[in-house]
Image: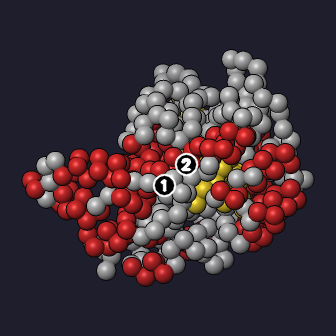
Amino acid sequence: MPGIPDEWPFGAEVLETAGKPVEGACLTDIRHQALRLDLKEKTENLSKTYEPRFSSGIWFFGHTASRFHEAYKDEADVGTKLKMAGDLARFGLRAIEAHFGPAWELNRDTINLFRELRERTGMIVSLIGGTGGDFRKREARYGTLSNRDPKLRQRFISETVEILKFAKDLAKEQGCPPVANVWPGTDGYVYSIGTDFYDLWDRFESGLAEAMDEVPGVRVTIEPKPYEPVVNSIYRHTADGLLFCRHVETLLRNGANRKLLAEGHAMVGMNPEIGHMKMGVEDVAYSYARAMREARLAHIHVNSVPLGSYDQDLNVGVSGTETMESVLFILRMHGYRGFMGMDLNPEYMDARAAVANSMNEVLRANAVVDALNHRRLLEAYASPEKGTGVVEHIITSARCSADASKKLVPFQEIEKWNGG
C-alpha cells in the first residue's frame, strides 16, 4: 500500500476520495498527491488510461492587448467569447476560466451567460481569476493586497472576499468547486535596494488570510511569475509559491479552515504555468512534482515559452516539445486529476485554433507516455548502473510508435476557424 511521511494526518485511505469535492467546503480532495508509491503502484498509475481534463481561459478570446501595437483582432463581448469556447466542447474542452469583477468577464450580471454555456455544453468554471483584487486598475499600480495605502489595501481585501463568496456559491450551483486563483500582477518591486521584503510579503499574505477567514472553506491557488507587468514579481518561482502557501496557512484562524488543515487539505494550493516557469528557467516537471509532493497541485496552466524568454503564451508544444511529455509522466505517476488550463496569447490566430492546437499537442504527448515501457523506465532509474542507454531507447522508441491521430481535433476544423 502507498506510504506517507509521519507528519501527514492521513494514509492510503485518501485514494478513495481523490479528486472528489470535500463535503462542506469549496475544494476537491488532492491529498493523494503526497502518497509515496512503490514501483508497482507507480507503474499502474502510468499504465491507466489518462484523459486530460481540458479547460481554457476566456480572456484571450477576441482581441488581446499589447503595449507595443494595436489589437490585431476585434474585441468580443462575453457572450461571443463563450459561444466561441462552446465550439470546442465536442473536442474535449470541459471548463472555462474567467476573472471575477464588475469590469471582468465573470460577474453577477454575466453569470447567466455562463449558466447557458453549462446547460448547452456541460462546461463549468474551473478557475476564478482576479483573486487579490483587480490589478489592472490605476489604484493597483503600487500593488493590491500588499498596497501600503491602508484604504486601498482594505478595498482589495474586500474584493477578494467577494470573489471567495462567489466561488462558494458557484461550487454549489455547478457541483464542482472552482479554485480562486491569485496572480499578483502588480504586487512586487522595481529595485532590490530600498525594498522592505518582509513588509511586502507580510502585507500580501495577511491580507489574503484575512479574506479567507471571512469566507472559510474556499481553496485559493497561487500562480507565481518572475516578472511582468511589474518589474520583479512578489512571488517569482514555484519555490516562492510553496513558501507562500505555507505562510498564508499559518495565518488562518477560522475554525473551519483550521479543521480542513488538520485533515491534511491544502487551503492554499498551486496553479503553476509552464510559461512562467520557463521564464524563470525552471525544470517544469520538477516543479510540478514539488507542488504534488506537498499535495498542493490544484490546477495547472499550460502553454510554451522559449527558456528564459518573456511571457509569450505560445501554443503548447511549439517550443520545448519534450516539456509536455515529462509533465504528463509526472502528473500521471502521482495521480493528478485536476484541470489542465490553456493560458494562451493568440495574437495572430483565432483563439479556438490556438486551443485546439494546444489540446492536440497534449494528446500527442500523452500518447508518447502511453507508449513508454513504464516499468522498465522506472527500473532503470532505480538501478542506473543497469540502465545505461535504456532510458534513451525507451523514450525515442515511444516517440516513434506513439499515435494520437484518432483523438486529435481535425485540421480541417482548425483551418475553418482561421478562415481557410
The residue pinned by badge 2 equals: 360
The colour scheme is secondary structure
| First in sequence: mark 2 vs mark 1 | 2
Apparent side of residue 233 relative to residue 23 in the rendered image (left or right): left
Camera-side residue of 95 and 317: 317
Residue under the image location 63 percent in, 78 percent down: 23
The residue lying toward the viewer, choosing from 172 and 376, is 376
The residue labelled by disc 1 is 404
State left or right for residue 164 relative to residue 11. Answer: right
Q: What amino acid type is highlighted by mark number 1? A: Ala
Residue at the image position 62 percent from the left and 44 percent from the top: 411
Residue 408 point in image, percent of width and height: 56, 52
Res 141 seen here: no
Please tell me whether mark 2 sits on a helix, a strand or a loop.
helix
Quarter residue 25 falls in: bottom right
> In screen coordinates, is 32 left or right of 163?
left
> Which amino acid type is marked by label 2?
Asn
Q: In what element is the residue under mark 1?
A: loop
Q: Circles 2 and 1: CB distance less than 8 Å?
A: yes
Q: Report which quarter residue 42 is drawn in.
A: bottom left
Vertical relation: 23 (above or below) 267: below
Give the percent coordinates (x, y) of residue 65. 73, 28
Foreground of the two, 15 or 333: 333
